[in-house]
Every structure is written in C-alpha cells, then in structure tokens.
Image: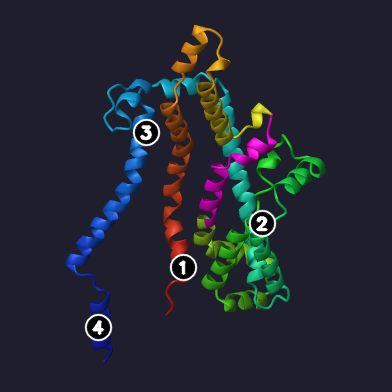
Amino acid sequence: MKGEKKRKEKVMNRVSAKWNIIFSILLIFCAMMVILPMALMVVVSFSSSESIKKAGYTFLPQEWSLEGYRYLLEMGDQILRSYRITIIYSVVGTVLGLLIMMMFAYVISQRNFRYSRFLTWMLFFTMLFSGGLVPSYILNVRYYHLKDTVWILILPGLVSAYMVIILRTFIRTAIPDGLFDAAKIDGAGHFTIFFKIVVPLSKAGIATVALFTFIAKWNDWFIGMLYVDNPNLVPLQTLLTKLQSSIDFLKQNTQAASGPDGLRLLKSLPSTNLRMACTVIAVVPVLFAYPFFQRYFVNGMTVGSIKE
C-alpha cells in the first residue's frame, strides 16, 4: 500500500519531457530578458556619442570610446571618496540594522511574551503612516544634529518594519518552540538563546534580509541629496545623480556658455554614454556581491513552504 502511494506521488511530481523543454525555454527567455539589457548598458557605455546619435542603442556600435569613463576619471579622487563612504555606510548600516532587527524579531516571535501582539501592531502601524519629510528633516537636523555626518546615512534607515516582520515569520517557522523551552530548562537566558540558537539557525533569513538591506542602502541617493553637503561624505549614487543633473542642465541651457568655446565644450560633454558609465560603476559591486548571497537567498524564500 505504501509502495503504491509512493509510486503515485513520484508520477505526480514527475515533469514530462515536453513540459521540461517548455520550462527550459521560458527560463532561458527570462534570463535573456535580464542579461541583454545589462549587456546593452555596458556596450553603450563604451560607445561614442556620435555613434549613439547615428545608430542609437546597438550591440555593435560604429565607434568605441571611453569618453564616459574618462569624464568620470577627470573628477579626481571624488569618485574614490564616494565609493569609500558608500561601502562604509552600506556595510555598517546593514550589520547594525540586522542586529537590531533580529533582536526585535526575536522578541515579538515569542508566543508567551505579553506585549508581542502590541509591538507587532505598532511595527505594522509605521508601515502605513509616517511623520513625513519635513518633521523628519527638522528632527534629524535641529535635534539630532546629524546633518553632514556619516550617521545621517546610517541611523534613519536602520530598521525596516517589513524586514522585521519577515525575520519574525522566519524565526517562528524555522525554529520550533520546543527548542526554546529546552534551552530555558538548561538555564540559558535570552541573550544566550539569541546568539547560540536563533542566529545560527536563521542564517538563510539573515542573508536574505542582508541582501535586500545592502542593495537598498547602496542605491539610496535621496538621503545624501537632502542632508549631505560635505564632499567627503557624498555617497556614490548622490554624486552620480548630481553629475548627470548638472550635465543635463548645461546641455538644455546653452545661455550658460559664453562664446563659441563654451558652446563647443557643452556639445562635447558626454551624455548617454556617461549615464550608462555611471550605471555600470554603480551596479558592478552589487553584481559581485549577489552570488555570495544567492544560496541563502533561495533557502530563505522557501523556508516554511513545505509542511510534513
């Protein structure tokens, strides 16, 4: 009877050759939808402005050029400083944020904790309502004095309510309550349980949230645009946004140039290839970081999907 049941389950879970081919084609198509735009972005970044004007976006440009990257290198050490400050606040912000969010998630994941539902409701409330931009600016500048400090890039976005809820659900799903009870019987306190049990068993969830948090911080340009004036603290995304906005403004307002030399300079400024070059240097570090998280990312998304 059991053998017959297992045989039927295998037949139901088996994918026929025809559907296997169809799924393979669909996956290849989805992969190409992701790879081709990125490859085109890289090719256009190495194309000359004249080639882009004549042929548009193409994988085989008429003329190759490094003018977009050359213009970025002419900015001197500013690119390196922006890279450094972006790496620092992205890594530090991700680590600190994970520590705080994991502790919060562990607390509200305890079913016997009296205020678990209340704290969860308060957390969910912040996802629906916020004070707004003006109160946040006044609070950060006038009372916390975070303007033009590296902490303005770290502290305001340290905790994400959505990520805390994901971690709480992960802890409740992946770690049985009996394990907590056994640890308490053995005399373990909450910090011991957290660091010796919860953290090691939650590597998949932590890696998943770490990837999302790191990418969000790496791509954040608005905080730097709003609070940072010190050139040594300008994040990479903010720098590239200001650079592209300045070039677009100059190209659209030719009155800013005085004389034929100024007009010639404005016309010679790279535009599309510079925009693509900015995108390439901003995306490459994340592409290198993603493979290290991929295995945990897949595990984190599928934990709790199957119940035995």
Closer mark to the observer between disc 4 and disc 3 = 3
Q: Position of residue 191 (x, y in %)?
A: 68, 64
Give the residue number, with chain letter if any, for mark 1: 303
**Which amino acid is tagged 4?**
Lys
Closer mark to the observer between disc 3 and disc 1 = 3
**Which amino acid is tagged 2?**
Ile
Residue found at the very far left of the displayed protein: 17
Name the residue: 68% across, 73% down: 117
Residue in front for this viewpoint, 58 or 115: 58
Cα distance, mark 4 to mark 2? 47 Å
Name the residue: 61% across, 55% down: 98
Give the residue number, with chain letter if any, for mark 2: 100
Location of the N terminus by quadrant is: bottom left
Cα distance, mark 2 to mark 3? 38 Å
Residue in front for this viewpoint, 69 or 83: 69
Element under disc 3? helix
Cα distance, mark 4 to mark 1? 25 Å
